[in-house]
Every structure is written in structure tokens, then in C-alpha cells.
Amino acid sequence: MSSGKKSYNKDYYGGALMVLVGGSAAYAARNYNIGSLDHMGPGYFPFAVGVLLALTGVLIALTAKKKPSGGEAALVGHNHDIPDFRGAVCIILGTVAFYFCGEYLGLLPATFAIVFISALGDRNNSVIASFVLAMSMMIVAVVIFWWALQVQMPLFKWGM
């Protein structure tokens, strides 16, 4: 029945790639002054992001499930012959919409656009769920970027 060979899905390999990229970033950041939490040096942020990326990759790889065998894949309804581009197209369109909305309409419409359009890329999300997520992220964007970080982007604007 089982050949003894483990066959993992794309989560395992994606997690391993994240560990590799995160570890490389953290390793490269050691050439810069990292500093401390009170006095961060130029290497602090790349080091911290690299470590967090590597840890996230480890968690993703550890939770990866084995691929179902041929018979199980048919029962689940996977069709590996036809690629699904919906997610990629929605993420690209969301990013383009963020750029134009940010340039001509402001932070809140740009945040709504990128989250709403990108969330539609997941077949499990409904339009209502995407709308609620986008509205929630608008609140987060105001608190983090506009209020706490004081990013110089107006909440609303019209035109150039």
C-alpha cells in the first residue's frame, strides 16, 4: 500500500523556502550594526524580519499534510490539470487598485480596494466576508499607519 516515501504538499516546500529566505536575511543582517531595542541599528529590522519569516516558515512546514494518493485526490475533487489563477489575478489587481486609489483617493479607499479585491481571490470568501474584512482593515490602517506611524498619506483626497 504505502511505499514508505513521504509526499508533502506545497505548504511543506513553501515553508522550507521561507526558512531559507528568512535565514539568509538574518544572516546577511549580521554584517550591519544590529543595536538594541532602545537604539536600533540599520541591521535590526532586516534581522528581525528574517527571524520572523524563518519562524513562520517552520510553523508552515510543520503543519504541512501529506499529499493524498491518487484515489483520495479524486474523492476530494482536486483537478491538478487545470491551474487556478483566480488568487494570483485578484492579488495583482488589488495591488494595482491600491496604487491608483492611494494616488488619487487616499489611504482608506486604497486599503479597502487592496483588501477587498485580494480577499475575493480565495474561493472560500464571500463578497460579504470580503467587505467586512476590508472595512476592518481600514480601521487597522487608520490606527497603525495614519495615527501611530503618522504616514503622510491623507485618509481621503480627490484627484491629484
Image (cartoon, rainbow, N blue to C red):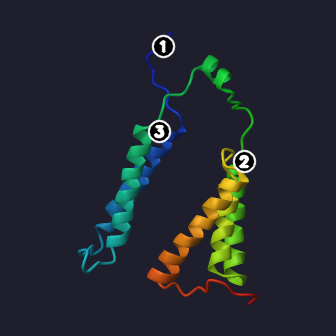
**What whole-number distance in Å separates the C-alpha atoms at marks 3 and 1?**
20 Å
Residue 95: give x, y in percent of width and height.
Answer: 66, 66
Assign a secondary structure to mark 1: loop
Read off the residue under disc 2: 85
Residue 19: give x, y in percent of width and height.
Answer: 40, 50
Read off the residue under disc 3: 12
Residue closest to the eye, 41 or 151: 151
The circle drawn on residue 2 is 1
Residue type pointed to by label 1 = Ser
Give the answer, above or below, for where 34 lies relative to 106: above
Residue type pointed to by label 3 = Tyr
Q: What residue is at 48 percent from the left and 82 percent from the top?
A: 147
Residue closest to the eye, 102 or 3: 102
Q: Callout 3: few (<14), some (14-19), or many (20+) C-alpha neighbours within 10 Å?
A: many
Give the side of residue 27 with respect to residue 90, left or right.
left
Residue 72: give x, y in percent of width and height.
Answer: 61, 20
Dot 2 or dot 3, earlier in sequence: 3
Assign a secondary structure to mark 2: loop
**What whole-number distance in Å separates the C-alpha atoms at marks 1 and 2?**
33 Å
Q: Callout 2: few (<14), some (14-19), or many (20+) C-alpha neighbours within 10 Å?
A: few
Give the side of residue 61 with respect to residue 127, left or right.
left
Dot 3 or dot 1, earlier in sequence: 1
**What whole-number distance in Å separates the C-alpha atoms at marks 2 and 3?**
21 Å
Give the side of residue 154 with respect to residue 148, left or right.
right
Give the answer, above or below, for where 137 lies relative to 77: below
Quarter of the image for residue 111 reads bottom right
- Looking at the rendering, in which quadrant would you find the C terminus? bottom right
Q: What residue is at 59 percent from the left and 85 percent from the top?
A: 153
